Amino acid sequence: MLNLKRGYLDLRGHQVWSAQGKTFGKKSEPVLLMHGGLSSTESWDYTVIPAVQRTHYVFAYDRSAHGRTASREGFYHFDFQTDEAIAYIEDVIKGPTHLIGWSDGGIISLMIALKRPDLVKSIVAIGTNFHYDSGLTLVESDPEIVITEDDAAKFALRSPDPAHMQEIIIRKAYEVWNSEPTMTVPQLSKINCPVLVLTGDDEPFSNQHTIELYEAIPNARLAIVPGSSHFVVKEKPKFVQQLIKDFYRNLDYPITTWPRLRKEQTEKLKEQ
């Protein structure tokens, strides 16, 4: 990863692959990058890190059963991954942080904000669904798992797990994606930190679901990137970086000229 110190650390008895690095600024705030499912911290190298490496102190880690971190019991359920993330924030970052989550990482970021709002400064949720019943069309309940030689070689090179675990991990991912997450609109309405909902216009779940997520969170902004998919961070990296930079330039509640969703709050702020 760019300009980051990498290596294993002990996270409450489990060896977790972690990366972190100082920025050019002296008063930079921490940002934790939460990678997608069946992915790793390396997904961020030339996609999102350039948006924050000069303004934030960057942290990232491979979740259990991802990248260079071994699996352990309960590894793929979102509650487990949320608790693991909270442990990382408490023990490694040691205080509130900004979160940038892609796909599963976005789901986990929202769940952290619900479970431990005191640890979250803001969220960038990229390609994120809040409920498994989201119009998701590309997740089969019992998929045929095809592992190419290249995929097997990458797993062998990175993962501490034995080779046979690769298929087990993939099957577990599909099992979880067909039953989790189960967040609701009333729950999401309790998230008070600034949130940027950033998505491609051709996600595997419905655009209506994305808009429902955006409208449920009181202090949210919405960015739908045209001509892109769930892999928007790789398809339109420069555009995504600019959107993230713009979000961080001003995290104050947005005051717009002709508000609808923000009308009541805008009027209150103008009266102050």
Image: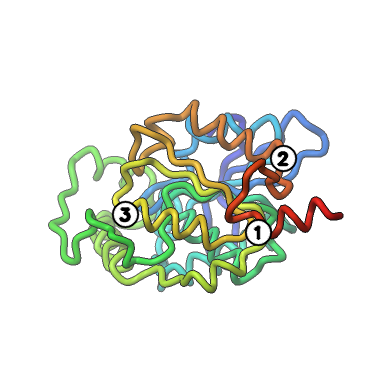
Q: Which residue is situated farthest in the top direction here?
A: 238
Secondary element at tag 2:
loop
Q: Is residue 136 above or below residue 28?
A: below
Secondary element at tag 1:
helix
Q: Residue at x 48, y 44 (%)?
A: 198
Disc 1 marks which residue? 89
Q: Looking at the picture, which amino acid does disc 3 mark?
A: Phe
Q: Looking at the picture, which amino acid does disc 2 mark?
A: Asn
| Residue 247 found in image quarter | top right
Badge 3 density bin: few <14, some 14–19, many ≥20, Cα 10 Å: many
Disc 2 marks which residue? 250
Q: Earlier in the sequence, mark 3 or mark 2?
A: 3
Where residue 129 sits in the image (x, y, percent)?
41, 58
Q: Looking at the picture, which amino acid does disc 1 mark?
A: Ile
Disc 3 marks which residue? 205
Where residue 190 sits in the image (x, y, percent)?
61, 69
Q: CA distance from mark 1 to mark 2?
A: 23 Å
